[in-house]
Amino acid sequence: MNELNQKIINETNALAAEYRQKFIGDPEGELRAWLEIAARREALVYQVYGEAQRKVRLPDPQSGAERAAWDTLTEIWQQEAIHTELTRARLSSGLVSLGGGPLAPAVLQTIGALEGRMLCSLTPAQPTLGRALARFCVMAGSVLAPGAVPEFTRELGTMNAREFFELAATLELTARQAYRRMHDLLSSLQAKREEPSVQLQGLQRELHLAYLDEDFHERAFLRMTRWMDAAGRFKRGLSERECVQQICDLLPQAPEPIRGTEPRGNSTYVVTDGGIGALARRHGIELVVVPEE
């Protein structure tokens, strides 16, 4: 892991420590704060993984590995859209007991989308005027609002495909940490209740699946970096299906067979398909999603 990605993780860890202190005795407040962070982050990665950025990082996929990387990134982007809607819905009306925050969910996601566009401008494949303007905005923001602009943004620069995927893996790692913390907070809240809350139980299941998705996405991005050399050039000789199979093998496995059924051929039993179910089917790989009990 390079120094930049480690700084991103360190900033997330520092925020977690700050929240633990700020919200001592107030798990509801901390949960909402993390949901607000998640809303912004999901909107950010939705921008960063979008088609425009895929065309920048993978402008002309020709090798099997390149095509597999394009399709995997596309499927992950679509899954992040589901996470974006999850956080918006829960902040809007799904957690009445937590109260409303100072900013509406739509505003939080607009901020996240702008942050995503800024991140894309700061990390082009080649130097651009847009990057120069983005760096000026970062430096100006650092002067006008000290502490509001993350320190690591000053170090963002041009990135080849490998470096971009390493950054994406780091973003997924920090998302996984956030979802895990929210899951733990919900466990604490439910333990204090005399009667179980269907609403909180439902949210806990959703957050656990989101955690598994983000964990898979992180490992998928890291696996794709193995298909490239240090300069971000894809290696030749890897077939598209072979690469897709490697990605499918990273999914969280579920026990098999499903109760009352027999395994079907080469089916893979998973807890979540991580958003790549359609991609797997196109390559003749059957993923059977088995919900956890």
Image: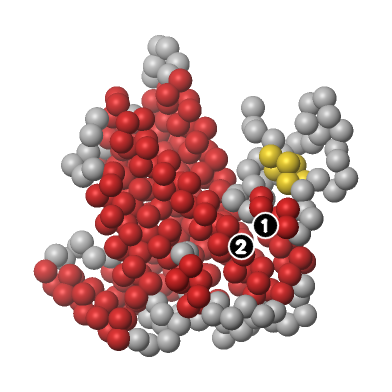
Return the x and y of residue 222 as percentages of the image width and height: 59, 66
Q: Secondary structure at mark 1?
A: helix
Task: Name the amino acid, label 2.
Answer: Thr
Return the x and y of residue 99 as percentages of the image width and height: 24, 30
* Residue at (35, 48) in percent of width and height: 39
Mark 2 closeness class: few <14, some 14–19, many ≥20 residues within 10 Å: many
* Residue at (53, 51) in percent of width and height: 79
Image: 289 above or below 156: above
* Residue at (47, 42) in percent of width and height: 180
* Residue at (16, 66) in percent of width and height: 146
Mark 1 = which residue? 279
> Depth check: 95 or 212 in front?
95
> Depth check: 59 or 139 in front?
59
Does the rendering let one see residue 18? no
Work out how far the residue at label 2 is from the one at label 1, CA to CA, in angstroms: 7 Å
- Please state which of the two labelled residues, at mark 2 or mark 1, is closer to the viewer: 1
Mark 2 = which residue? 72
Image: 52 above or below 257: below
